[in-house]
Amino acid sequence: MLVLHDYFRSSAGYRVRIALNLKGVDYVRREVPLLENAQRSPEHLARNPQGLVPALEVEGRVLTQSLAIVDWLDARYPEPRLIPADSQARAAALARAMVVGMDVHPINNLRVMRYLEQELGASVEARSAWTAHWMAEGFSALETMARTADAEGPFLGGAAPDISDCFLIPQLFNARRFAVPLDAYPLLLRAEAAAVAHPAFAAAHPDRVAPNA
């Protein structure tokens, strides 16, 4: 049995929950309360020296980094594919996912927000402006990528979700938490609407896995 260590509102953990659900893989969740700094505990640092989530226990070993975990899932459980086999489609799907996973999320996550506040003295207003700026930049690029790909949708990956949808939906969830305007991204919202109706996405939603849910 796979064991997923994550935090219910972690975007990176949310991505992996979606992927696991899409694959239909049984797993057990273990909550790592980030607001209590549980990610810095000796127990968790032994799993992931970065002190981050998610961490996926697999047969006595631990996988970290959401992109690497989804890639492993695709290799271990090939259907349904989340990373296309075709080389060009694969590169396009990974590029879309990386806009979120490498350009948007890392500079808007909890540890960055804490650093801006505690070390640089950034006000609530400044932190909100920071978040809105970087999310808008990433979403604008993704919207253009989706439009030029000319996919029929409804997902970024086409008729079925791919890895980029696994990354997009948690980031849109975060955007709504921080009141980031989204009206300028109709193709991203189309993908979100399709995800809302998809059982794998719905079961991964933070509201469904919160400790008091």
Image (cartoon, rainbow, N blue to C red):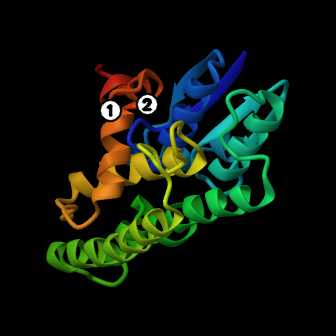
Q: Nearer the viewer, residue 192 or 18?
A: 192
- Residue 72's image quarter? top right
Q: Disc 1 vs disc 2: Cβ atoms closer than 8 Å? A: yes
Crowd band around label 2 with a 10 angstrom C-alpha radius: few (<14), some (14–19), many (20+): many
Residue for badge 2: 201
In terms of sequence position, does the residue under pointer 1 or pointer 2 come before the other?
1
Picture residue at 21% right of the left edge, 80% below the top:
126
Q: Is residue 181 visible?
A: yes
- Residue 115's image quarter? bottom left
Residue 108, numbered circle? none
Query: What secondary structure is marked by label 1?
Result: helix
Residue 139: percent from left, percent from top: 37, 67
Picture residue at 47% right of the left edge, 40% below the top:
14
Left or right placement of residue 49 versus residue 143 in this view = right
Query: What secondary structure is marked by label 2?
Result: helix
Q: CA distance from mark 1 to mark 2?
A: 7 Å
What amino acid is found at the position of numbered circle 2 in the picture? Phe
Residue 145: percent from left, percent from top: 49, 69
What amino acid is found at the position of numbered circle 1 in the picture? Val
Where, quadrant-wise, is the C terminus in this rendering?
top left
Residue for badge 1: 196
Residue 107: percent from left, percent from top: 45, 72
Left or right placement of residue 27 versus residue 191 in this view = right
- Residue 212's image quarter? top left
